[in-house]
Amino acid sequence: MHRIKFVICIITVLSPLVFAEQFPWLDANYNYRIKASVDSGMYIRKNYVLSVDINFQDLLKNSIDANHIRVFDQETQKEVPSIAKPAVESGGGNLIAWLMQGKVEPLSEKQYFIYFGGSGEIPEKSNRPAEFNIPPTRHNLISNPDFEENGHWLMEGKGCEFSDKEMHNGKRSLRINNSKPSENDCYSDIFEMKPNHSYLLSSWFKVSKFAANNDGCLLIELTFLDKNQKPRTPPAEENYRALLGLSVSPAEEDAANFLGKWVYEKFTFTTPEWVNYGKVRLRGYKFIGEGYFDEIRLCERMPEKPKIVLGKAEVRPGFSAN
């Protein structure tokens, strides 16, 4: 099963109405349509969710029922799964999302028509799946990243535990309490990753106390794994891991300023060509003291989005827009 990817393109349509030309009108129940031309870009797209924001209030001087908006693929001349709902940000607009079905090769062009503004009784959509929702965030590869439930983390050492003493959000975080350097570790479940892909690793850190002569850090160590779920290490492989941390070294000018405060850190990296899996290790590297991790995120980044260009709003032949 392919994960559905999502992109949103915010566009306000203010073009004047024109009469339909060139392409046949695919649904006579609707009086208006707008052509959406899509350039897939430099990446293969699989079941990709496209989205635009159209302000019908400005376009027609009238609101549109979101349930009466449909999207058709011009090539197949068939309706595609879509949803529409009010877009709060646009002040009268609608967010319209639809599925670019199947596999679309790089540098491909697709054309869709968004139909709206019907008269009389319009049949309810039959192909709008209940599970087709606009995802609020990109998929996080790490299970139980907020430590709100038990499981998915293997802890080594008595000073490593889920804690309700401190948290950035929710009810719990992960606590590491070292009385000597690097004595406690916590390991995530193994997760799938893609080779030669860009990822964003981020987390909230908090140091509640540390030794005065401390020269360590709270550290997230992401180890890359091959198809056999085995790591590769130097000298055979130099690019074998990604690191994200919060240093409490006295050499860091602001080290004392973040004591007792939640600090957000993030890091972007590209995986090597041999990577198939990954595993995260949480630790206090050379760290003596008490620290916390919360809201760890590891998400695939899509550096380029498909380009969507909207045409002018067209009027169905034989229908008077006045």
Image (tube, rainbow, N blue to C red):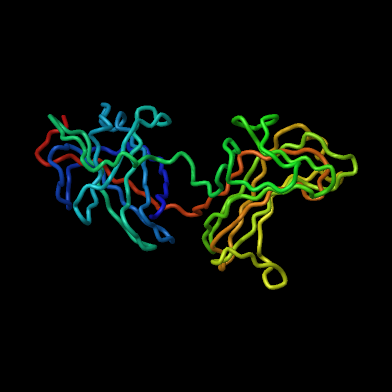
**Which quarter of the picture shows residue 34?**
top left
Classify the position of the C terminus by image quarter: top left
> Relative to residue 177, is residue 303 depicted above or below?
below
Residue 104, image x, y percentages: 34, 60
The residue sitting at the right extreme is 213
Front residue (pair 16, 63): 63
Front residue (pair 309, 114): 114
> Relative to residue 110, is residue 262 depicted above or below?
above
Residue 121 falls left or right of residue 35: left
| Residue depicted at x 41% and y 52% | 3
| Residue depicted at x 57% and y 63% | 229
Residue 19, image x, y percentages: 17, 42
Classify the position of the N terminus by image quarter: bottom left
Front residue (pair 48, 94): 48
**Which quarter of the picture shows residue 85?**
top left
| Residue depicted at x 31% and y 53% | 101
> Relative to residue 143, is residue 14 depicted above or below?
above
The residue sitting at the front extreme is 158
